[in-house]
Image (cartoon, coloured by chain):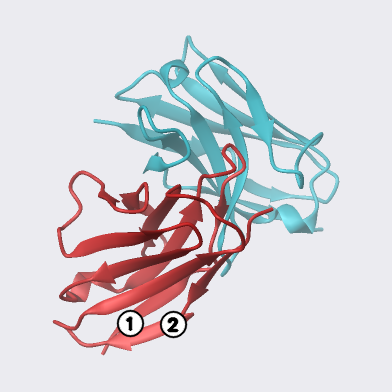
């Protein structure tokens, strides 16, 4: 069974850093395109980042240069390193897996982890 | 960036009704469109991809249609468990995908 479990969210001061983790089971992270999507409280969904099966990374303009996506094949875990955080980054962050053979659509999502940026 | 606009923003319907939600793209996305269902406090769930392909395990009362800039999600016979917010998403500009603002569906 495919499962994605995020962790690492919490309350962080503006300008701070946080690393989110996403532990995957039931499949191999490095075999798939993996996506981070966020959702600000009461708002819609926003794409954040993608790492391809080949390891190429892509970012939304709003986080480029501040966020870094990576993966650890030994632990089958996806990460999102977030720096220079601001209030606009406050959101639930979802780790997700793209549909097999058709990248761009997301078929499995984690439960989300809340990041709150506030002083 | 391609903007996705959904209408209506909210809709209320009765069990058994046929419900239609529309999504319009600011430029053509061909058939690169998906629909998701999100219930409060939960992650989104993929319903439809490639505009009209039903995701495995999704009830057949859900269907999608359209291409280019105009798309439709139809629920043929509304069930109580369909109360949720629905989002469209374009994948034409993959990896930079964008979502609509959402349509809240309430059961009367």
Display colour for chain A: cyan
Q: Image quarter for residue A100?
A: top left
Question: Looking at the picture, how far across and down is residue B16, in whole percent?
Answer: 13, 82
Q: Which is nearer the N-term, disc 2 or disc 1? A: 2
Q: Residue at x 62, y 37 (%)?
A: A49
Marked residue chain, label 1:
B
Quadrant placement of the C terminus of chain B:
bottom left
Q: For residue A5, which quarter of the picture?
A: top left
Q: Residue at point 77% right, 37% down? A: A64
Identify residue for label 2.
Answer: B10
Q: Up-down: is A78 above or below B96?
A: above
Which residue is drawn at the image coordinates 41% and 64% (left, top)? B71
Q: Nearer the viewer, residue B46 or B65?
A: B65
Q: Position of residue B47 (x, y in %)?
A: 30, 54
Q: At 46% across and 81% down in the image, what residue appears?
A: B8
Numbered disc 1: secondary structure: strand
Q: Which residue is mark 1?
A: B106
């Amino acid at each position: 069974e495919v499962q994605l479990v995020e962790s690492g969210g919490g309350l962080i001061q503006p300008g701070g850093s946080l690393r989110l983790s996403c532990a995957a089971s039931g499949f191999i992270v490095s075999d798939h395109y993996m996506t981070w999507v966020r959702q600000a409280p009461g708002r819609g969904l926003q794409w954040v980042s993608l790492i391809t099966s080949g390891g190429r990374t892509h970012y939304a303009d709003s986080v480029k240069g501040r966020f870094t996506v990576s993966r650890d094949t030994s632990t089958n875990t996806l990460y999102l390193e977030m720096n220079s955080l601001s209030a606009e980054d406050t959101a639930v962050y979802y780790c997700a897996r793209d549909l097999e053979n058709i990248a761009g659509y997301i078929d499995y999502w984690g439960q989300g982890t809340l990041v709150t940026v506030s002083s | 960036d391609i903007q996705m606009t959904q209408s209506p923003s909210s809709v209320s319907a009765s069990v058994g009704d046929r419900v239609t939600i529309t999504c319009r793209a600011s430029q053509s996305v061909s058939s690169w469109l998906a629909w998701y269902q999100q219930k409060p406090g939960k992650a989104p769930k993929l319903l439809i991809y490639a505009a009209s392909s039903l995701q495995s395990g999704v009830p057949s009362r859900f269907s999608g249609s359209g291409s280019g800039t105009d798309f439709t999600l139809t629920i043929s016979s509304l069930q109580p468990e369909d109360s949720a917010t629905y989002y469209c998403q374009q994948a034409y500009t993959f990896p930079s995908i964008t979502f609509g603002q959402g349509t809240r569906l309430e059961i009367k």
